[in-house]
Amino acid sequence: MDERDEVRAKGPRGTLGVAVIGTGRMGADHVRRLNDVISGARVAAVADLDAERAGRLADGIEGATAYTDPAAAMDDPGVDAVLIASPGPAHEATLLDAFARDLPVLCEKPLTPDAASALRVLEAEQKLGHRRVQVGFMRRYDAGYRTLKSLLDAGTYGRPLMLHNKHRNADTPPGFTNAMMINDSVVHEIDVTRWLLDEEITAVRVLRPAPTGNAPDGLSDPQLILFETAGGQVVDTELFVNCGFGYQVGCEAVCENGTARIGDDHGVFVNTAGHWGGTITPGFVERFEDAYDRQVQRWVDATRRGEVEGPSCWDGYAAAAVCEAGVRAQATGERVAVELIERPDLYR
């Protein structure tokens, strides 16, 4: 039994040593989260092509080592698990390296940027014979979404017939494209739709109304995205990423005997100086901070028990396939069917 096996064998009593791959905005935030917020884990290594940035981050954490090569970080003797927060195109190689070492992984979305590479990852995990990956679809850990999921699963209002989603950002960063509206934004509605309804999305349409004057040249904003599911439900998502006033995410389920809606919380409601109202969060980090914390804590807890839970490689692959159909629908204005392989037994 080597040093890493001894740490794993300690089970709930052992502290999980995590290698964080990617030290940009999300990676640095996860380092902070592992180091300062959650319990049962520590940052053992960080890796980034930017050696200076990785070094600065590691210097602030006792016992952490900086690397430029993700594989080298995984080979650090203090590493028991991997959190991937690097850009999407780098995920496949890092995931395969983690599989070669049979390390558990929390992978920020996307699993990979396209369905073909996601399928390769899925097939590689199947060869292990057990799950190793949890995909970072953090909305599944948001209190509001979890309550809505519980209501739908319990049949409280009867069978769900439709979902209405809204997804609004104050503005977009330079270089944000129409394809990114699907791949980087609507991907979250894709995942929560599949999760809330427990159905696969079978077709996508994208409607593009007259764009706002606040959108950069070439960006068609807002958009209305329509999903059809295998169970016959219809789901719409209003996507408005240059709304100018803040970050809003919400979902309403329309069921046979009632409706349920989340996302209307505006904080403390005040009346003062001729005005009334609440606040709107400025960005996704603030809106879903608790969900990120809960997601990472659940991953750490499950990993220390020797288990894998949460969104799987199948969920990452299915989301990538729906995104590809969505980008085609966006470009053509046509209804585009989603192409999926048969779901493997490992993910049933």
Image (cartoon, rainbow, N blue to C red):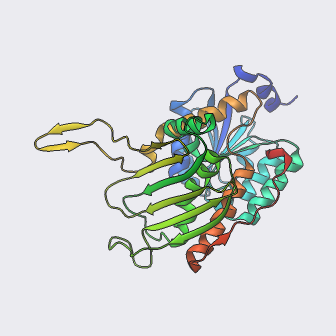
Instruction: Choose top left, top right, bottom left or bottom right for residue 171.
Output: bottom left
Where residue 189 sits in the image (x, y, percent)?
55, 54
Where residue 204 sits in the image (x, y, percent)?
61, 67
The residue at the far left in this view is 273
Where residue 206 sits in the image (x, y, percent)?
54, 70
- Front-lying residue, 181 or 38: 181
Vertical placement of residue 49 versus 338, above or below: above
Vertical placement of residue 341 versus 300, above or below: below
Decide if residue 136 is in sight here: no
Position of the C terminus by quadrant: top right
- Left or right: residue 212 versus residue 344 is left
- Left or right: residue 184 versus residue 14 is left
The residue at the far top in this view is 13
- Left or right: residue 279 versus residue 209 is left
Vertical placement of residue 229 versus 303, above or below: below
- Left or right: residue 342 versus residue 262 is right
Decide if residue 306 is in sight here: yes
